[in-house]
Every structure is written in C-alpha cells, then in structure tokens.
Image (cartoon, grey):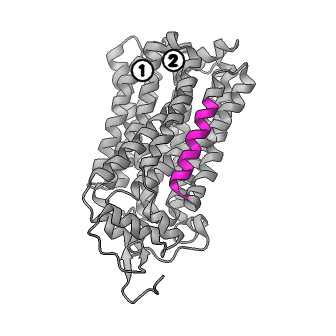
Amino acid sequence: MASIAEGARFDVAAFIDNRSVGAREVLVLAIVSALLLLDGFDMYFLGKILPRIAEGLGGTSVDMAPVVTFQQIGMFVGALIMPPLADRIGRKPVLLLCLLGFGGLSLGAAYSNGFTMLTWLRGISGVFFSAMLPVGLALLSETTPKHRRALFLSIALVCFSGGNIMSGVMTAWWLDELGWEGFFILGGVLPLAAMALLLLVPESLSYRVNRNPTDPRIAAMIRRMDSQAEVPEGAYFYIGTQKEVSPLGPLAMFGKRYLPQTVLLFAMCFFSMGNIALLANYLPTLLYEYKGLALETFAFYMIIGYIGGACGTLVMGWLMDRVNPFVLIASYFIVDAVMIFSIGRLAPEVAIVFVTALVVWTFCQTGGQTGINNLATLAYPPEMRSSGIGWAGAMGRVGGIVFPFLGGLALAEALPLDTIMTITAVPALMIALLVFILGRANGGQIDARARAA
C-alpha cells in the first residue's frame, strides 16, 4: 500500500453526515427495525401470558418467579459481554449470533416439561436478546446522517416497542388458539428466518475505521455508497473530531472525563429498566389477581396503551433536538410516576379512564426510556458507543433482576395493589432527579466532546 501522504486523510463521519438519506439508509433502518421488533416480541410476551404458562406447567403464577428472575440475569450477562464483542468483531456478526441464540432457545422452550427447564432456557435466551438493542442502535447510528439520526433511532425504538404490541395483539385474540407454546414457537422461527436479512446490511464504517484506519475495505465501501466520492490513494480514515482510540477500550468510560455521566446513566437505567421489567412481567398478573381483569382484556387495553408508547418515543426523538433534553426527560418521568400511582387505584371497569391512564403511562415510560437511550448513544464516542449503550443497559438489567424479584415477593405476601403501585412510582421520581443532576453537571450539553470544546 502506498504510504500515507500529507493530506491523504478521509473523514468518514463527515462523509456519512453530509449524505442525503437514500435507499441504503432506509434499508438499514428497515432491517434494524424489523430485528428489534422480533427482539421486543421475544422479550415481552412472557409477562402477558405468565399465568397461562404456569397453569400449563401445573403450577401457579408464583412458580414463574424463577423464570422471570433468571431471564433478567441472562439479559444482564448479555448486555455486559455482547456489546464489547460487537466493538471488537463487528456489529453484524454479533447480531447474527443473537438471532441464532434466542431463536433456537425459544423453540426449545416451547417443549419445556417443567419450571426448571423453562427457567434455564429462558435465562440463556436472555443473554442473546438483551444485546440486540444496543448493538442494533450502534449500527443504525453509525450508518445514518447526523441530521436524521435521532429520528431514525426513535423509529427503530418504536419498532422495538412494536414487538410488545405484537405480543399484546396475539394474547388478546389468539392465546386460546396458539396456546402458550405457540408464542415460543413463533419467538423461535421468526428470528431464525430473519438472519437472512443481515446479508443485505453493510458493516459499520465507524467500526472498520476504529479497528484499522488504513483498511482498504473502507475505501471500497465508500465507493459503493457513492461512486463520485474522492478517496485519496492509501488514505488514512478517521472519525470527525475523534481523538486516538483509548487503549483502555470501553473502560475509558470510567475515566475522569466520562465517569460522572457514566454513573448517572447507569443509575437511571437501573431504576427505569427495573420498573419496566417489573410492570411488564407482573402488571397483567396483578390486575388479574387483584382486580379480576382477564388477561385477554388487559392485552387488548395495552394494544391501545402501546400507541401511547410509540407516540412518546417519536415525540421524544423530535423534541430532544429542539428543547432542553434534560428538562424534557425529567418531565416525562414525573408524569410517569403519577400514572403508575393512579393505575393502582383506578377501576378497570371504567374503561375510558383506565385506558387513558395506560396510554399516558406508556407514553411517558417508553418515551422516557427512549430519552435515556439517546443520551447513552450520544454521550460516548464511536470506539466505546456499543459498549456504553450496552453496559448502561446491563445496569438496567440489574434493576430488571431486583425489581421483578421484589415484585414476586410482593405477590407472594399479598400486599395491597395500591401499596405495590405507590412503591413502584418512587423509582420514576428518582430518575427525574438523576436526569436533572446530569443536566446540571453537563451544562445542558449531551455530547461529552461538545462540553469539552
């Protein structure tokens, strides 16, 4: 290869950011969104049919507590180890591995002969489907021009929530026809079939630059994207204002520059994702056992409620570039706390009031988590982006272990529903406080590099 001449440098970030959104970008958005849709389905259908699974295995809802707990442990492990693997070997190989892993294990879970077998299969599955979101978002963010990045990330997150909606539709209309086993079969077959879609997606240019800034494949990828691009012979590729990649790798997020935001983001994810896991896994059961609300009826209500979640995600993505993001996210979680408190006291029979509360709750819960995800995506440079998103998510999975465990204890102790929901509202207020503190610490700026400029 020719030596690197003075000025023979090529800014890959500028090349991506200056492009118009075209077929390539839309294709990546569509495929990542489809994969996250399947991931969301596999992640969330368990809670909607939990009592039916327990009955099918000859037990009660309380017997499912280990399944829920081990699933969250698996998700923690996956969020911890898979994103750094994606920073090392690439986004696409890890996405393929995850689809193969949770798809195959979900098929096996359909033939579980008891709670122990289901607990192990679901726990190992969690390792794989927890990594789809951070790695998929990293790939999408590194492919999309900056002026459409927040919107594209929000659309992908809406599709992730759409998996939740899909499982709700199936529960409301086809639970009896499919049986609980049918959910696991679909949760296995669809991801395995979707592996073929990744053949259509190019690897992240930012990943290749960080692995080897003189890799000749980078020039070939750029020319495929734009035949008119002027790539110098023997070019040295770099990412905008990015400095030399830290030898510490993802551990650099615990250095002096990034430590405050890392601690605060981890704490936000702990409380937010803990609450999401608790309510996703136990709210249908709580309303079924305390209020007599049929699983199918609640699933139908939540189909409407998830529309609020989709709107909350899109509104969050649109507003984050236009108003103070920290005030915006904190406001979401304050309203979230009010709605959680209210749901424990509203009568499901008054459908219009109850469903309205569900819509506002999902608007704020899902939109608020989108805000946190966007903060994590934008807070770290490319060389640690996948790890930053993933490790923040891993801390969220710790919350996803602790909170459902406490939910299982509350269910076993038969605490009053209004008491359970009041306690559950407190973490949302904690998140609002943490977001406010992060905003003050960062001087209102999301990007750490912008604060240093």
- 215 part of magenta stretch: no
Nearest to N terminus: mark 2 or mark 1? 1
What secondary structure predominates along the stretch shown in magenta? Answer: helix
Q: Amino acid at mark 2?
A: Leu
Q: Residue furthest front?
A: 1
**Residue 346 visible to the viewer:** no
The disc at residue 287 is: 2
Check disc 2 and report its element: helix, strand or loop: helix
Percent x, y of residue 440: 41, 62
Who is closer to the viewer here, 290 or 383?
A: 383
Percent x, y of residue 143: 38, 57
Who is closer to the viewer here, 191 or 397?
A: 191
Depth check, mark 2 against mark 1: the one in front is 1
Q: Which residues are magenta?
A: 90-106
Percent x, y of residue 25: 32, 52
What residue is shown with label 1?
169
